[in-house]
Amino acid sequence: MRIKRPGRGRPRRRPRRLAGDKGYSYRRIRRYLGRRGIRAVIPTRKDQRRNPKFDAEAYRRRNIVERCILWLKEDRRLATRFEKLAVNFLAMVKLAMIRRCFRLLEPSDRT
C-alpha cells in the first residue's frame, strides 16, 4: 500500500489511523499500532477503562465506509469477485453504485 505524501520524498506506507470495532480492542493490538506510529480508532469494550483520546467522529466515518461496502456486496457479482480483471471489477463497482443511487432516488412503495 502506498500513500502519496505532499511534496517530495518517499511515499508513506503506513496509515495515520486504523479503525476497528470492539473486537479489536486489545492492549496488545494497541501497543503494536502505537510502536508503528499508527493511532488506533477502536472503541473500548465494557470490561476496559475508557480511552479519553478516542476519536468518535473518525469511528463514525468508518461505519459509513463499512455500510457502503456491504451495499456493494449485495451485488452477487462483486461479492464473489466474478470479474477477474481490475478494470472490469472497477466498472462493476461503478455500476453497482449507480444502481444504488437510483434505488435511493426512486419513490418507495413501502410505507
Image: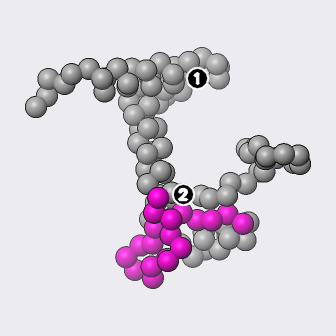
Is the residue marked by circle 1 packed among few (<14), some (14-19), or many (20+) residues within 10 Å? few
Disc 1 on helix, strand or loop? Answer: helix
* Residue 35 shown left or right of residue 22 in the figure: right
Q: Residue at x 58, y 65 (%)?
A: 40
Question: Is residue 83 in view from this perspective?
Answer: no
Q: Residue furthest right?
A: 9
Disc 1 to disc 2, how far (Cα)? 24 Å
Which residue is labeled 2 in the image? Answer: 19
Residue type highlighted by circle 1 = Leu
In front: 79, or 107?
A: 107
| Residue depicted at x 47% and y 18% | 95
Is residue 36 one of those drawn in magenta? Answer: no
Nearer-the-camera pick, 104 or 45 = 104
Q: Amino acid at mark 2?
A: Ala
Please give the label number shown on residue 31: none
Q: Residues within 10 Å of mark 2 (few under 14, many from 20)?
A: some
* Residue 100 in the image: above or below residue 65: above
Q: Position of residue 99 (x, y in %)?
A: 39, 20
Task: Classify residue 103 as left or right of residue 109.
Answer: right
Q: Position of residue 97 (x, y in %)?
A: 45, 25
Indicate yes or no whether the magenta region holds residue 55: yes
Q: Residue at x 72, y 66 (%)?
A: 37
**Residue 75: which quarter of the image?**
top left
Please name the residue that numbered disc 1 is placed on: 90
In the rendered image, the quadrant that contains the N terminus is top right
What secondary structure predominates along the stretch shown in magenta? loop
Q: Quadrant of residue 29?
A: bottom right
Residue 73 on image: x %, y %? 43, 32
Quadrant assignment for the C terminus: top left
Q: Which residues are magenta?
A: 37-57
